[in-house]
Amino acid sequence: MLRTHTCGELNMAHVGLEVTLSGWIQRSRDMGGLTFIDLRDRYGITQLVFNLESNSILCMEARKLGREYVISANGKVAERSNKNPKMKTGDVEILVDHFTVLNVSKTPPFTIEENTDGGEELRMKYRYLDLRRNINRKNLELRHRMGIETRNYLNNKQFLEIETPYLIKSTPEGARDFVVPSRMNTGQFYALPQSPQTFKQLLMVAGYDRYFQIVRCFRDEDLRADRQPEFTQIDCEMAFVTQEDILHTFEGLAKHLFKTILNIEMDDFPRISYDQAMKQYGSDKPDIRFGMTFTELNDLVKGKNFQVFDHAELIVGINATGCSEYSRKQLDELTDFVKRPQVGAAGLVYIRYGADGTVKSSVDKFYSHDDLKIILEAFNAQPGDLILILAGKEEKTRNALGTLRLEMAKRMELIQPGIFKPLWVVDFPLLEWDEETRRFYAKHHPFTSPKQEDIPILETNPGRVRANAYDLVINGTEIGGGSIRIHNKELQQKMFKILGFTDEEASNQFGFLMNAFEYGAPPHGGIAFGFDRWSTILGGCDSIRDFIAFPKNNSGRDVMIDSPSAISEAQLKELGIKLALPVPLVKAQKVRFQKE
Ligand code: ASP
């Protein structure tokens, strides 16, 4: 046997026992006549001791072992004289009688410790070494438990886990598809699914009324920070349900995960409409761990000859409580912050309500003391507060103030770790107007059903139509979203028309779905959660890469296996693909591992 126990389980109850442990050498120390080795495996670390006096040959051999060597050691469990209360196994050590080197190791390119000296790129290249670090192991364990608990919860509620294909058909809506050339159908391509959306709807038509899948999805998007080209969803669909049923079922899942993973009992989640979220927080994924909601000032500030406000569609502000002492420099920093192209405000107006009751603003020229006092009242401001105001086009200004609100929360240290504030955002608009292409896009996706009461204005005022669509947001991050679906062919056709599809295009792309709707499609709806992101939030971290075993970097590359990469001329030929650009040369014939 290469081991009788793991490196994480021995304690005082095992003292005197003869054991064999196997693992990696974390570090070793020579202290006079003794050599100590910390042996590590997935479960923990146990200290091995070698005594120069009682067994000098063994001890000298042990001193030759390097970091990350794999050894198997056997000996007696003994009580430590110098206990380490920080370690689970810190009360004991192994007095080694014998060990075997199972494999040697080069010196690792970075230290495999809690705080490593390796930069991200290096750790990605040697991801298998990075994964030896405790922190990564804990993250993957949490992800595993989340998967198990998700399956438990949904299984108990009669959901069936059903797999859907990965090689599907490219469709124009949504993000860009990853495509896969078909060798057997030269010149034709599969697409990898951006989500199993249409398949799960077909499963509802097929009568499987509760489906889920923990499933990989692929989106060829320009990579924004912390996006992965392939990511995992907890994808769910239910038939014979209303929006209320879905929110209830999946709030249950969220509470179950909070309870089983973090041992936190959650109250019912608040709900807020999309419109309200935008008005109060300037975001459809508000972080409600802190207040600082918006106050609109159009009625109070117009008509005082301040052109910026007079010409603005919206004048809106927040109260940064207790920040009246912000220096000129700090205010300039905030002004620069809101003027950055990503935020896009033209400028920042402030009103300082000094602790001594004095009022000072950047618009004193236009507003009397009394005018300013009225504005302060609108914010419920107290002496010591600082009011920050933006003005301009409605949507842009709301978004900009939303970003400033988050920035202020950071600066004011309002966000405490370990606090979770989930909420549902409901009543999303069905469509979104794009100024550049001058057409409507589906806000969620083209299968989302408009609210019954808004169907009459679908053709006359599409921009105002609300959808039965909802998002689950936790701590300002969208964790999941879904909708009640259209299950009627005519309505689906109408929807495609509004989205600019010709009848022919709609039937080429989605004919299979609309045909299915003619064979007794039940009312249905669903939701999908970002599994990587949800794990990350519950793990109290920021980057989803930390919760994916083998993630891609910010340019969508896997630097460990060096992918994507060119393929050989022969492969291209077989696929009937001629590259317009010169092909980077790929050496030699592909090595085949098996005879075909
Ligand atoms: N398929 C959708 C998505 O990937 C989620 C849903 O509507 O269920 O966002």
Image (tube, helix red, strand yellow):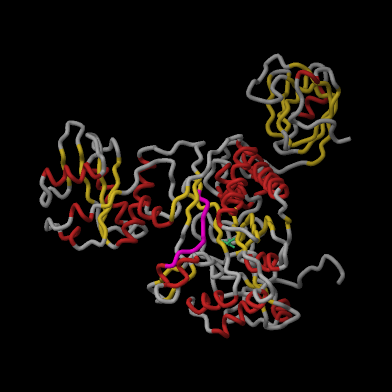
Residue 518's quadrant in the figure? bottom right
> Can residue 23 be seen here?
yes
- Is residue 68 inside the magenta stretch? no
- Please tell me which residue is depicted at 73% across the width and 23% down the height of the picture: 35
Point out the residue furthest to the right here. Answer: 1
Residue 429's quadrant in the figure? bottom left
Residue 509 position, x and y percent, is 61, 78
Residue 277 position, x and y percent, is 40, 53
Name the foreground residue: 404 vs 41.
404
Q: How many marks?
A: 0
Residue 516 position, x and y percent, is 67, 74
Residue 582 position, x and y percent, is 59, 79
Name the foreground residue: 319 vs 408.
319
Name the foreground residue: 52 vs 162.
162
Q: Ligand 1 falls in which quarter?
A: bottom right
Up the image or down, 570 lies above or below 449; here it is below
Name the foreground residue: 559 vs 30.
559
**Quadrant containing the C terminus in the rendered view:** bottom right
Point out the residue furthest to the top here. Answer: 81
Up the image or down, 447 lies above or below 18; here it is below
Taking the image as shown, residue 376 lies to the left or right of residue 399, namely: left
Q: Which residues are magenta?
A: 465-473
Taking the image as shown, residue 578 lies to the left or right of residue 321, namely: right
- Please tell me which residue is depicted at 44% across the width and 76% down the height of the picture: 459
Up the image or down, 14 lies above or below 491; here it is above
> Can residue 564 be seen here?
no
